[in-house]
Image (tube, rainbow, N blue to C red):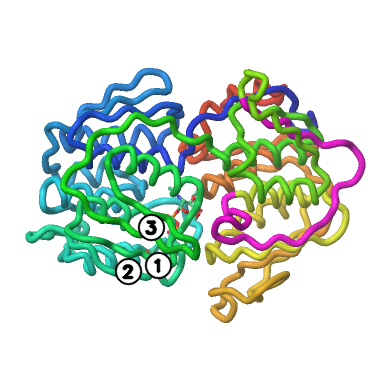
């Protein structure tokens, strides 16, 4: 039931876009690894299962994983296929498995339907490092009989996944790898910290150049995953959309800096507690009352406005006075969720043109990747089918901001990246029934 301001406290733990990669990095270690601040989300379950399929023991107590890769072995492709489901993580297991076993298998990948989600950058990088890729009906078989060799790789786009692919393939490769046009998201830097703890030699230069000197072996790691800045921002947008007041325990200012600037421009208020007084770090987000400001947003790779912040922010912008513009430059098809918002009474028009900023890769290619949002719009409850992880959370926010009752189908997509979100909604006085 919508119309009730969300107010109270929620705790956000480790980043959904770092923790699964850290788990894969454990395969590279010759001794066990410990990962802390681990959220209870489906993506962690999936990767735990994939590691166990490959002979890794995984012990899980609340918030902590201990992974022992002492007996890493091949797994049946069918079992990987079944277990990976829609997860894209198997592509990142290539480098570590090739180093341990000489080969790897990747099933046809899933993941959120927000664009084509190709893996050409990944396969090109592996081939340049000496791997051979064979396409079969059930997926890709990759092997490197002579091992992987360091080389110069330049990405045509600063892809997060491809950067992770190169990092986890180069750390044990023969010789040095120079990666140009690398992604530098906070989750990437956290993964580099993990690899450094394991004994890797990685230098991050300015201008997106990363150099990795291959070493002979790596130990396990003990690491506290950085907090999920994407979940924190989602709750911040919920506070704006419902005229509420939400304190996110665990949120940190630095990785959210660009989001905080935009939040303030829209008219949201925030207060950072950096834990200096010994209390837990947190950021309080609230709607100060009065109108919200329409703004122009262009998503970008780090340190720009993260594409995963876009969908929750669009819901908040339906409540802003005037015309807001969103130009999505990272994914070609990440505005489809706005159709359902229009059925609820929002007034959002999507365009093929690059609106509100520079031209991007999608400009002349028939992708509806810009939106104009006219507000404030009175949202009414509706029946909604969740399309993807962030779109799903955005529907949740819209339903809580709308007048009357909404029904959401496909909540399991939200469980992939938002830990215990129904308990958190209860803690924030949301009115809902789980059917
Ligand atoms: C990661 O996806 C995140 N997912 C995404 O978060 C995030 O939006 C994205 O990085 C960008 O920050 C995880 O970390 C699990 P990319 P990833 O490779 O690595 C194109 C969420 O909601 N591309 O940086 O798959 C691609 O199509 C999710 O938490 C190629 O063309 O993203 C896209 O247009 C959604 N070829 C662009 O690059 C490739 O081989 C960025 O993709 C790889 C990518």
For mark 2, does the 10 Å Cα neighbourhood hold few (<14), some (14 to 19), or many (20 or more) residues? many
Q: Which residue corresponds to the image point at 34% horizontal and 59% vertical from the top-left?
A: 211
Closer to the chain start, of discs 1 and 2, is: 2
| Inter-mark Cα distance, 3 to 1 | 9 Å
Sequence order check: which comes first, mark 3 or mark 1?
Answer: 3
Q: Is residue 70 visible?
A: yes
Whether 271 is among the magenta residues is no
The answer to which image quadrant residue 304 occupies is bottom right
Residue located 54% across and 74% down the image: 361
Query: Gap between marks 2 and 3, in whole Å?
Result: 10 Å
- Mark 1 touches mark 2? (CB < 8 Å): yes
Which of the numbered marks, if any, corresponds to residue 163?
Answer: 3
Q: Quadrant of the C terminus?
A: top right
Q: Which mark is residue 153?
A: 2
Residue 198 percent across, percent down from the top left: 28, 38
Magenta span of residues: 281-308
Q: Is residue 247 left or right of residue 411?
A: right
Q: Position of residue 417 (x, y in %)?
A: 49, 38
Q: Quadrant of ligand 1?
A: bottom left
Q: Residues within 10 Å of mark 3 (few under 14, many from 20)?
A: many
In the picture, measured across the screen, residue 113 lies left or right of residue 179, that is right
For numbered disc 2, what is the local secondary structure?
Answer: strand
Relative image position of residue 294 (x, y in whole percent) = 82, 56
Question: Looking at the image, which residue sits at the far right?
Answer: 290
Give residue 45's position: percent from left, percent from top.
Answer: 35, 32
> Is the N terminus in the top left, top right, bottom left or bottom right quadrant?
top right
Residue at the spot of label 1: 180
């Amino acid at each position: 039931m919508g119309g009730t301001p969300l107010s109270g406290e929620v705790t956000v733990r480790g980043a959904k876009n770092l923790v699964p990669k850290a788990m894969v990095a454990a395969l590279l270690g010759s001794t066990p690894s410990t990962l802390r601040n681990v959220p209870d989300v489906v993506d962690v379950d999936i990767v735990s299962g994939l590691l166990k399929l490959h002979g890794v023991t995984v012990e899980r107590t609340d918030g902590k994983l201990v992974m022992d890769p002492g007996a890493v072995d091949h797994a049946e492709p069918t079992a990987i296929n079944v277990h990976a489901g829609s997860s894209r993580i198997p592509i990142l297991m290539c480098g570590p498995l090739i180093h341990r076993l000489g080969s790897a298998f990747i099933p046809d990948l899933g993941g959120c339907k927000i664009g084509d989600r190709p893996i050409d950058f990944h396969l090109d990088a592996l081939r340049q490092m000496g791997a051979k890729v064979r396409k079969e009906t059930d997926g890709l078989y990759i092997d490197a009989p002579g091992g992987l060799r360091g080389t110069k790789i330049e990405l045509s786009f600063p892809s997060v996944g491809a950067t992770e692919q190169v990092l986890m393939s180069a750390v044990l490769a023969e010789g040095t790898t120079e990666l140009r046009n690398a992604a530098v998201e906070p989750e990437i830097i956290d993964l580099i910290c993990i690899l450094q703890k394991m004994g890797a030699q990685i230098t991050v230069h300015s201008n997106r150049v990363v150099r990795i000197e291959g070493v002979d072996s790596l130990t396990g790691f003990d690491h506290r995953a950085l907090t999920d800045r994407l979940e924190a921002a989602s709750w911040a947008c919920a506070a704006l959309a419902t005229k509420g007041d939400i304190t996110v325990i665990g949120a940190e200012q630095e990785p959210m800096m660009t989001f905080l600037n935009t939040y303030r421009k829209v008219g949201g208020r925030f207060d950072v507690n950096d834990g200096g007084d010994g209390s837990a770090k947190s950021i309080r987000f609230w709607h100060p009352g009065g109108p919200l400001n329409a703004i122009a947003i262009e998503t970008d790779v780090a340190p720009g406005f993260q594409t995963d912040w876009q969908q929750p922010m669009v819901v908040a912008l339906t409540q802003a006075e005037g015309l807001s513009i969103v130009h999505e430059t990272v994914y070609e098809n990440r505005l489809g969720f706005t159709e359902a918002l229009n059925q609820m009474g929002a007034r959002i028009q999507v365009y093929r043109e690059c609106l509100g900023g520079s031209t991007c890769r999608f400009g002349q290619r028939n992708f509806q990747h810009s939106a104009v949002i006219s507000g404030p719009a009175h949202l009414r409850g509706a029946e909604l089918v969740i399309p993807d992880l962030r779109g799903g959370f955005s529907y949740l926010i819209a339903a809580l901001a709308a007048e009357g009752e909404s029904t959401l189908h496909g909540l399991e997509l939200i469980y992939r990246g938002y830990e215990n979100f129904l308990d958190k909604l209860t803690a924030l006085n949301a009115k809902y029934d789980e059917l």
